[in-house]
Amino acid sequence: MEPSQEEIQKLRNRFIEEVQVQGLDFHPRDVARANSDDAWLKRFLVHNDMEVEDALTMMKETCKWRKTHQVNDLSVNNLNFEYLAAGSMFIHNKDKDMKPLFIFKCCKHVKGQKDFEELKKCVIYWFERAERMSDQITIFFDMMNTTLTNMDMEYTKYLINLCKMYYPNFLNYILIFEMPWVLNAAFKIIKSWLPAKAVQKIKFVNRGTLKEYVEPSQALKAWGGTDEYQFVFTPEPSPAEWVKDENKKKVHFANHQMVEVLEMSSNDDSSRDDASFGGGNSKVRLNPNYAITFVQEGIEVSGSFTITNTSDGPITFKVKTTSPEKFRVRPYNGALAVGKSASINVLLLSGYTAACIVQDKFLVMTLPLDTDNPSPGQINDAWKNNDKHDVEEHRLKCNIGSNVSQQSTQPNGAIGSATPPSDMEQKISQLLVSMNHVSDICSQVEADLKSWRKLVLIFMIVFVSFAITILYALSNVPTGSESCLPDVAGRSDL
């Protein structure tokens, strides 16, 4: 069920009213987000089954938590870089619903080896980074080569509470890959911490079934896919770098890089019929050249257009939009040699209805280049150091095709706020103690077996050496008949 615009506005008004009346001390960036980000407010409403008061309470608790934990100020500079670079958690590729995969390499985490407070900051950093990329994520627990020593129930419970309390309606799936049987009991406990709606999102997968949720091209080779990616931590620009001036901001698109987006007024209809603002000598041709028509295929709503280089030299292009939170553009930039074309696909993200994009616009910018095959660095440098007079602009509106449903393109699940009863918590604690005890016993038995192996090996070496010595000694002892011959001979002479 989707909240109406009236419900979203009601939640916004109630939040702003309480901030002003009660003087609530929230981070300015969070207050500004509540003022402008409909998608964020909608997540609180969906999470709380459209109950405005419950959504308001959750919003206030979330903003309070964000202020207390300085979430808006987290960056690589104030985090433990060793933890970030270890590769125990990272974001890479997408599931079939085009949601980023937040991957946990469970075998790389051992309980107690890292400072838990520092580890929590790193988790929040990745959650924030993922939230700037998409409205939802899929958490992927890669449990290959995982043992009981890698199972950290406190860590897992913290991840669950983040989604339940501070990142509403953020989970698309929880994929658990190749879970060892020895951890079945632990995951029964984890399920008890989750509400029923969240339990439905848990999917146990292996090499054979992963393709139901992740395309082989998006799956790592170790999972049976074709992606040979090896993790290397790459920081994103700090929040201070997201804003270049009051008319620009930064936003993530499909390739997880940062994109400049022009804040064009939705009310500016630019009464011109001609979409091109480059004058009569246009360097490119757009098809269509006036509006992107969005059509529906299955559950996806998308549109496309083609850009062709009609100039006498190579060019680079860049696509911007008035509502970056609604769309994913592929590719959002690139280079074209003379006479070459590129097809640009625009996907409407889940949670948005087709009716909400009729006022949105796209801006296609082009710039001359000096080379036919520029590197990504050369393209970035060209845009950074460009002369504004060389930039050609084309605007495109959004049209809705006749086959597009006015409903949300994809269903959004919600995670309730249920908590386990107190007696269940007690049983869980007792079971955790027992599991830790079993884990300690297993470790001790393993250590004892190694010691016994060494003793057996030493005994075998000593035994073989002793046997060889005895055999050698026996082989050199004279026989009885040979020892008597001289005496017999002597007697006969007498």
Image (tube, rainbow, N blue to C red):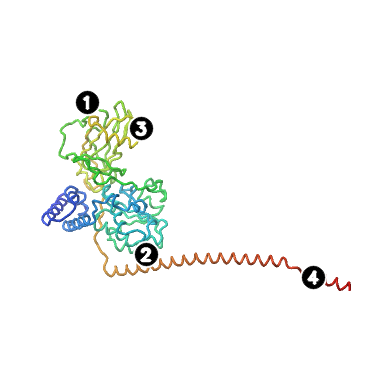
Marks 3 and 4, the one that precedes in the sequence:
3
Mark 1 highlights which residue?
280
Camera-side residue of 23 and 137:
23
User: SS for tag 1?
Assistant: loop
Seen at 36% across and 63% down, the residue is 186
The three-letter amino acid code for the residue at tag 1 is: Gly
User: SS for tag 2?
Assistant: helix
Q: Residues within 10 Å of mark 3 (few under 14, many from 20)?
A: few
The three-letter amino acid code for the residue at tag 3 is: Asn
Mark 3 highlights which residue?
373
Mark 2 highlights which residue?
185
Mark nearest the camera among 3 and 2 is: 3
Mark 4 highlights which residue?
481
Q: CA distance from mark 4 to mark 2?
A: 76 Å
Q: Residues within 10 Å of mark 2 (few under 14, many from 20)?
A: few
The answer to whether any part of residue 427 appears in the image is yes
Q: Quadrant of residue 488?
A: bottom right
